[in-house]
Amino acid sequence: MSNLRGIDRSKLTPQFEAKSAGRVLILDGDGPAYRVAATCKRLDTAIRRYQQDMLTQLFLTGSESVRIHLTASGSNKAGRYRVIGVKPYQGNRTNKDKPSLLEPLREAIANRENWLDEFDSVFMHRIVEADDGMMQDAYYYGERGVVWSDDKDLRMTPFPYWDMEKGVIIPTQTVGSIELGYTPSGTPKLKGHGPLFFWAQMLMGDTADHIQGVLRYQGKTCGAVGAFNALGTCSTIAEAANLVIDAYRSINQNPMPEGWLLWLLRNETDNFWKYLGEITLSEANRAYINECVTRNWFNNEHEAA
C-alpha cells in the first residue's frame, strides 16, 4: 500500500540511516546510564531498558555493532584532577546526588552476562574517562566508526559524528565547523564538529566540567557568541590555534591547563602538548607555549576526588 491517508509513501525520502556493513557505533554509555537509573527502581528493569536504548541507537545510526564506554566511579580521569587550572576540574559536581542505581547499572552493563549480541565491547574506564576511550576508538575505526554522545566534548572528533538534534551522521571534517544555536530559553549555544570545536572550547571553556577557558578575549569574557565570532571564519587549524594562543598570550594566561583538561586523548600516550607540536604556530606563540609548559600548573600529589 503506497498511499497512506493521502500520502504517497514511494515519494518519501528514507527517514532512518540504512544499516551499513561493518559500521561501528562508538557510544558514550554514561548519559544513557544516568537517564535509565533515574527512572527505574529495579536493577533488572534498568538493564533491560539500557539494552533497549542501545538497540535504538544502533537502529538510528545504521550500525552493526556498538562499543560502549563508561567512566567508573573513582576513575583517575587521565589525571585531570591534578591540573591546576583557573577552576578545579569538575569542582561544580561536588556533593551532587546521583541516582542510587547508577553505579550498579554501570557495573552490570560492563558484565558480559548482560551483553547483547550486538555489543562488540563494553569498557569501564578507571584510568581515563569514557570520552578518551571513545576518541581513541574514533581514530582507530576512522570512517567505519560513528561517535554518539550526550556530551558536547566529543564534537571535537574529526571523524563521523551522530548529531542528535538533526538526526544525521555528520561526515569526517579535517578542520571542522562551528555554528551558533540557542537553547529553548534563548541562551546562545555553540554547536559544531571537528577540531575547530575544540579551539572554540579553548576560548569559551566548558561549564559542565568547570573549565574556564580564556579569562578575557579582547577585553571581554568569552562565551558561545564570542567564540563563534572569533573562529567562525577560520579555514585551517593553524589559523584557529594561533588566534586562540594569541588571546592567552595577550593576557599572560597559561593555555596548558585549560588545553590539558579539554583535550581528549587520541591514543594511550597522547596529550595536549603533543597535539600542539603538530600545529604550525607563529614564532611568538611557539616560544610562549615553550615557556608556559614550564610553569607550575600540574600537581603530582593530588588525587582524584
Image (tube, grey):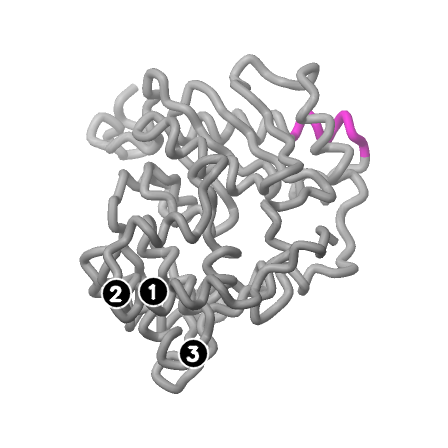
* For marks 3 and 1 on the same chain, the one whose residue lies earlier in the sequence: 1
Q: Amino acid type of disc 1?
A: Leu
| Circles 2 and 1: CB atoms closer than 8 Å | yes
**Residue at screen point 77% across, 25% down:** 44
- Residue 256 point in image, percent of width and height: 47, 62
Residue 232 marker: 2
Amino acid type assigned to the residue bearing label 3 in the image: Asn
Mark 1, residue position: 180
Secondary structure beneath disc 3?
loop
Q: Nearer the viewer, residue 174 or 6?
A: 174
The quadrant where residue 37 appears: top right
Between 279 and 119, the residue placed more toward the observer is: 279
Image quadrant in which the N terminus is located = top left
Quadrant in the rendering for residue 146 = top left
Q: Which residue range is magenta in the image?
A: 42-49
The answer for how far apart the CA atoms under marks 3 and 1 are is 28 Å
Q: Is residue 153 above or below residue 182?
A: above
